[in-house]
Image: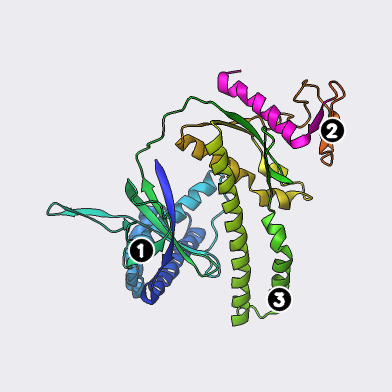
Amino acid sequence: MYKAYKFRLYPNDRQELLINKTFGCYRFIYNYFLDKCKNNGYQKAFDMCIKLKELYIEYPWLKEVDSCSLRCAIFNLEDAYKNFFNKRSNYPTFKSKYKRQTYRTNCIRSEYKGKKYASIELDLKNKTIKLPKLGLIDIRGYRKLEVINGDIINVTIIKENTGKYYVSVLISEIETLKEKIKPKSIVGIDLGIKDLVVTSSGKKYKNPKELKKYEKRIKRIQRKLSRQVKGSNNYQKTKIKISKLYSKIKNSRKHNIIRIVNKLIKEYDIIISEKLKIKEMSQNHNMAKNILDASFYKICNMLQYKSREEGKYYYQVDTYYPSSKICSCCGEKAEKTNDLGVREWECDSCKSKNDRDINASINIMFEGLKYCFGK
């Protein structure tokens, strides 16, 4: 099982300079061979790696950076073409120095006189990581983790638009999942915009709507950016301000989702949610911004892998199951709930008063029981 751990990097001046050089060389190799493929036809990564040796002679400054990272640029280009050929993405585009910068390098292992060596080493006790050409760099993250069992496959160095550096370490771990527990509690959850998560037990987790909080400030700074000279120092400073705001929104949203998911995993053994098609839902232009800001996919994805790690159960009911229309008391279908403005309604059959979201979550829970014990 592969698992990635992301840490904040704190390079010194020399390391920062070399990292930025590697970004430039990585980008140069990717764009160089992409241009060749566009003009002369697609080439395999093996053929491009042979031509890479000739570029070292023509451009000697390529020798200053990690050679493995340059080969990774070629293999990344090959993956981009494979995704295009298999219709998973659009045609590869040139990399820009004005966007988020990344480069990847593989961990190379060797053995000499009975002693094992690795080009990448992670030390969580001293909070350092050893990277090729860069040496030891201070890192922060995963404070409660003392050791990671598994082999390092590769690392990806990232420089965000805010100027912060991160490293994502891919580990090959032996899958040590907990045995499936004997379930004692179950919950159905309804995902929404007004309340982000509503449980069948009646608990509601508010949607903080992070984007709406900073929308006016973002608009004001973007208007300021449009009036400035493109490429000037003030232009770059304003761009960093915008990036920091978006970073703040992303981190706050992620923190809120992790808090909710951890609470659900801790309290319940079986969790059932609805399977949402975000792409179709976001085509509604009146609600698209709020739907994407809610990050429904991230919530479901996190519930899935965390429940698997803890030995618990997670199921998703069919996308088109009418959870909001059915009365959870008698099973009668009500068409009045087609209007999203109807938050509470009375069943014409049994006269029970239903909260729209709680009623939906109860229906999702009962529908999910079919997946637990078979239809």
In reply to whether residue 263 is colored magenta, the answer given is no
Of the numbered discs 1 and 3, the one sitting upstream in the chain is 1
* Residue 246 percent coordinates (x, y): 62, 63
Amino acid type of the residue tagged 2 in the rendering: Trp
* Residue 83 percent coordinates (x, y): 52, 47
**Quadrant, the C terminus:** top right
Residue 355 placement, left or right of 373:
right
Secondary structure beneath dot 3 equals helix
- Residue named by callout 1: 52
Image quarter for residue 261? top right
- Residue named by callout 2: 345
Identity of the residue drawn at 47% across and 54% down: 42
Q: CA distance from mark 1 to mark 3?
A: 44 Å
Amino acid type of the residue tagged 1 in the rendering: Leu
Q: Which residues are magenta?
A: 352-375
- Residue named by callout 3: 224
Majority secondary structure in the magenta region: helix
